[in-house]
Image (cartoon, rainbow, N blue to C red):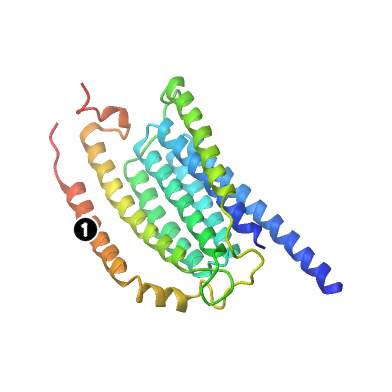
């Protein structure tokens, strides 16, 4: 039973890396947003796994703080999705596409 | 003896189930990154998030698994897929961003995963072999933490959500020139 949190930690590393790869190689703005969601979710998985495996003050295993932090990450991820999608809509109305290579006003 | 062998079978079953759900989560994540159609990507992300919610159940975070399905799958993903369909996005053209960025991303990815795996192999909590603490991950414990020690961070998060909502409305409504 104690090896499950370890496996979940390794899994979260793999998922985070997949998300990073997507952010670096894809060009659609919404695809990149979804890859960022993957990365945030991997962070949440690590938090939950560690919270399961830390020793509690009252005895036994499991400290709830990791789950509370994961809840905060979830709320910030929801806010990030709302603002990110608003920016994508503004980009689409400006350029007619969500290709991030078109947003190059600050590039010489 | 009998109960011990049953316990062993239970653990094997649990490990097998964990491996199955973990493989599902990883395959869905790879599909999100590699598929060209945004709608299909969104649906694979939904599959991935549900698989991860299953992992949360196995890690005794039952309340958080429910929250994951309700908020992530039920609210955030509906919003993302709604915007994909609103913009009528077509599948991305072949070619991607070229071979050089993909190569650098691959190198960076291999480095990142080895770094994270090294850090996590060094993680050895002092709770090896301990039983699960009483009431861990229950709604009562989460609520006591949120409205106890984490009261002010909790209120700040609600402010951040309001600010994000107002900012999203302003950003999406404004007429841009260019």
Q: Which residue is mark 1?
A: B163
> Is residue A5 rendered to the left or right of residue A85?
right
The N terminus of chain B is located in which quarter? bottom right
Residue B31 visible to the viewer: no
Which quadrant would residue B14 be assigned to in this image? bottom right
Considering only vertical position in the picture, is B105 above or below B167? Answer: above
Residue B82 position within the rendered picture, expressed as x and y whole percent measured from the top left: 36, 50
> Is residue B68 rendered to the left or right of residue B156?
right
The C terminus of chain B is located in which quarter? top left
Front residue of B119/A1: it is B119
Residue at image point 55% right, 68% down: A55
Residue A101 visible to the viewer: yes
Residue B151 position within the rendered picture, expressed as x and y whole percent measured from the top left: 31, 72
Front residue of B72/B153: it is B153
Which quadrant would residue B101 be assigned to in this image? top left
Front residue of A76/A26: it is A76
Residue B135 position within the rendered picture, expressed as x and y whole percent measured from the top left: 54, 77
Numbered marks: total = 1
Residue at image point 43% right, 40% down: B38
Point out the residue furthest to the right here. Answer: B1
Residue at image point 43% right, 33% down: B91
Front residue of A15/B27: it is A15
Q: Which subunit holds the residue at mark 1?
A: B
Residue at image point 57% right, 60% down: B125
Q: Residues within 10 Å of mark 1 (few under 14, many from 20)?
A: few
Residue B88 position within the rendered picture, expressed as x and y whole percent measured from the top left: 35, 40
Callout 1 secondary element: helix
């Amino acid at each position: 039973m104690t090896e499950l949190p370890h496996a979940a930690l390794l899994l979260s590393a793999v998922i985070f890396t997949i998300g990073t790869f997507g952010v670096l190689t894809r060009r659609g703005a919404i695809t990149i947003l979804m890859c960022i969601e993957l990365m945030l979710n991997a962070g949440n998985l690590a938090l939950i796994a560690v919270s399961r495996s830390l020793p509690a003050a009252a005895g036994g295993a499991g400290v709830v703080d990791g789950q509370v932090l994961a809840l905060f990450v979830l709320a910030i991820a929801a806010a990030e999705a709302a603002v990110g999608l608003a920016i994508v809509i503004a980009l689409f109305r400006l350029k007619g596409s969500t290709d991030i290579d078109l947003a190059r006003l600050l590039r010489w | 003896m009998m109960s011990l062998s049953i316990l062993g079978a239970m653990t094997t079953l649990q490990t097998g189930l964990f491996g199955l759900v973990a493989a599902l989560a990883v395959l869905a994540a790879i599909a999100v990154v590699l598929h060209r159609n945004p709608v299909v990507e969104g649906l694979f992300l939904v599959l991935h998030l549900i698989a991860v919610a299953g992992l949360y159940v196995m890690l005794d975070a039952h309340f958080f698994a429910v929250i994951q399905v309700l908020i992530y799958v039920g609210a955030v993903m509906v919003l993302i897929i709604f915007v994909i369909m609103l913009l009528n996005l077509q599948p991305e053209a072949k070619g991607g961003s070229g071979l050089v960025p993909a190569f650098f991303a691959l190198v960076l990815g291999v480095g990142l995963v080895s770094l994270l795996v090294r850090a996590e192999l060094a993680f050895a909590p002092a709770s090896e072999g301990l039983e699960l603490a009483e009431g861990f991950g229950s709604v009562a414990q989460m609520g006591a933490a949120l409205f106890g020690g984490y009261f002010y961070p909790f209120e700040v998060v609600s402010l951040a959500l309001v600010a994000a909502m107002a900012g999203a409305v302003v950003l999406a409504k404004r007429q841009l020139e260019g």
